[in-house]
Amino acid sequence: MQATDAQDLVAANEQVLAGIYAAVLPSVVHIQVGQGQGSGFVWDEEGHIVTNNHVVEGASTVTVIFADGDRATGRVLGVDPESDLAVVEVEPPAGGLKPVSLGDSDALAVGQLAVALGNPFGLDNTMTAGILSALGRTINSGTSSFSIPRVIQTDAPINPGNSGGPLVDREGRVIG
């Protein structure tokens, strides 16, 4: 491969990643709970936000900060500690909400691009990328005999505060 071909490949990859960031970021939220924080994503236009249970555990209300800086008080609508999922509901802001697009996790293959968006370490609007390292993993819940099946493993760096944020494919569709 010639240097020009490699540079073109890198430039194309950067364009894909920048496009994913621009498309998905308006759907990613920062969630603050007391002294803790995490991430989440807009599920629908009615104000439902998906996050991890451990992000909102023990809270009935949270602060939701959108990518544009707007804030809303969210009500924890439901939690599932066994699968570590939670739903928060907010009153949609005047400008509306931009829900995520959903991908097909059944069509994934090891080696595909995986992009994680969130708010690690309290820093807003970050993105990391890697590949799908393995599919179909099972994780024990740690709190009961229940286990989480069909887990997607990625090598995209995930740091404290990324929890609850979306993992997306090269089209910017949520896969995990």
Image (tube, helix red, strand yellow):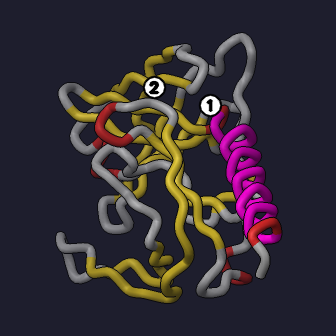
Residue sticking out furthest to the front: 3
- Image quarter in which the N terminus is found: bottom right
- Image quarter in which the C terminus is found: bottom right
Task: Depth check: give the residue in front, 117 or 60.
Answer: 117
Q: Which residues are magenta?
A: 5-25
Say which element carries label 1.
loop
Q: Is residue 144 magenta?
A: no
Task: Depth check: give the residue in front, 114 or 5.
Answer: 5
Pinpoint residue 51: horizontal percent, then vertical percent: 45, 47
Which amino acid does the dot numbered 2 rest on? Answer: Val
Q: What residue does disc 1 label?
A: 47
Q: Residue at x 54, y 60 (%)?
A: 129
Q: Residue at x 58, y 59 (%)?
A: 115
Task: Depth check: give the residue in front, 53 or 122.
Answer: 122
Say which element carries label 2.
strand
Local crowd at mark 1 within 10 Å, few (<14), some, or many (≥20)? many
Q: Main secondary structure of the magenta part?
A: helix
Pinpoint residue 23: horizontal percent, then vertical percent: 74, 41
Pinpoint residue 106: horizontal percent, then vertical percent: 69, 82
Q: Residue at x 63, y 60 (%)?
A: 168
Which amino acid does the dot numbered 1 rest on? Answer: Gly
Whether 143 is drawn above or below 99: the answer is below
Whether 112 is drawn above or below 72: the answer is below
